[in-house]
Image: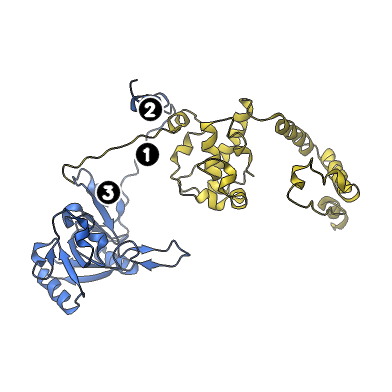
Amino acid sequence: MSNSRDQILAKVRANQPQDERPLPDLGLFPARTTELLDQFMTILTLIGGKVQRVSNYAAIETHLREHPYPGRMVTSIPALFSIAEPIPAPSDPHALANVELAIISGEFGVAENGAIWVTEANFGQRVAPFICQHLAVVLPVDQLCPNMHQAYQRLQGKDYGFGVFIAGPSKTADIEQSLVLGAHGARTMTAFLMDN
Amino acid sequence: MQGAQLHIVLVDNGRSQQLGRAAFRNSLKCIRCGACMNTCPVYRRSGGHSYHNAVAGPIGAILAPNLDMSKYSDLPFASTLCGSCSNVCPVKINIHEQLYEWRQELTRQGKVDFGKKMALKVMSSVLSNPGVYRSMGKMGRWALRNIPGMVNNSMNPWFKQREMPEAPQESFREWYLKNRK
């Protein structure tokens, strides 16, 4: 009982509910469709994202040369260093203040809500996917899971410092239900679904 | 980030105590979303400051007596128990039931003042006795019409900031008995 931490924890221990029942086993929620790719593309488009099917990194480069972004482009993917500069080492996040397009890699996508799981390892600098005006995520087309239940199961035991699901561009409608894209993050989000 | 430190600061603020109150433990689920306040007919009229506590609204009225039963004994009574808060609560706290529980607990602990206790006793006997209820209603309507000074004075807290309503000639029950076919 020396410090306040011990006092708080002792009190919490003493006041534990006596009538607690074990949590029920809900099992895994089954997928609603086997057409994961169709569902993912439909949902991501519906929530304001763009989807591009590509066969390889060269196709991404071609696409970006045909639809150029007017400004600085950074990427964490070495295969795209020919078109975008590498994201600088995590020292000063302000160095990314004027980034127009950030291209990062995604771990896997979730078909039911169009979300893509990305971790620090995918973009080096935590601020990278949020500070950019436009965001592009490269996702292997076979890395899709049906729903969030299965997504979280997939994350069990994974070691990552910071990870986040990104679903489409930044959206907010909390002021008078008026939808604003890009108030807090990227104004557009493109998923490059790449064949293996 | 590799090599970085993470510090967690524990803030008790009465939570460990509320954990021990079986009837109110559920209130610890609160995520402070404010949905109960937005929907509360009392909060929407009275505003946050009337709760004289950092957390206002229906959830505040449950959390505050845990911190100080004497200081916040009035809060659980300032509710119509309409249940709108419980209905919108995203984490399904039984807010209006806990408000009702707190009223009983505060009364048991002797934290309710004598006037309120007596008023509730009178109200209970009037409302549970239809004959008395009707004749009291009749007397009230008559008094409002004929000797308004009896209620329109500073002894009546309801008169302080507002005009008393115009008393109708008959109650709904009287009208209904006359008009039902």
Chain name for mark 2: A
What residue is shown with label 2?
A: A8
Report, in whole angstroms, how far the alpha carbon at label 2 lies from the one at label 3. 32 Å
Q: Is residue B7 left or right of residue A140?
A: right
Q: Amino acid at mark 2?
A: Ile
Query: Can the viewer see residue A141 in this picture?
Result: no
Q: Nearer the viewer, mark 1 or mark 2?
A: 2
Report, in whole angstroms, how far the alpha carbon at label 1 lies from the one at label 2. 29 Å
Neighbor class of circle 3 (other Cα within 10 Å; few <14, some 14-19, many 20+) is few
Neighbor class of circle 1 (other Cα within 10 Å; few <14, some 14-19, many 20+) is few
Which residue appears at 32% of the width and 59% of the height? A32
Between disc 2 and disc 3, whose residue precedes?
2
Front position in the image: B26 or A109? B26
Q: Amino acid at mark 3?
A: Tyr
Q: Amino acid at mark 1?
A: Pro
Q: Are marks 3 and 1 on the same chain?
A: yes
* Mark 1 vs 2: CB contact within 8 A: no
Q: Which quadrant of the view contains residue A147?
A: bottom left
Q: Nearer the viewer, mark 2 or mark 3?
A: 2
Can you say whether B141 is above or below B106 in the image? below
Residue A110 percent across, percent down from the top left: 27, 58
For label 1, the SS is loop
Q: Are marks 2 and 3 on the same chain?
A: yes
What residue is shown with label 1?
A: A24
Residue B37 percent across, percent down from the top left: 54, 49
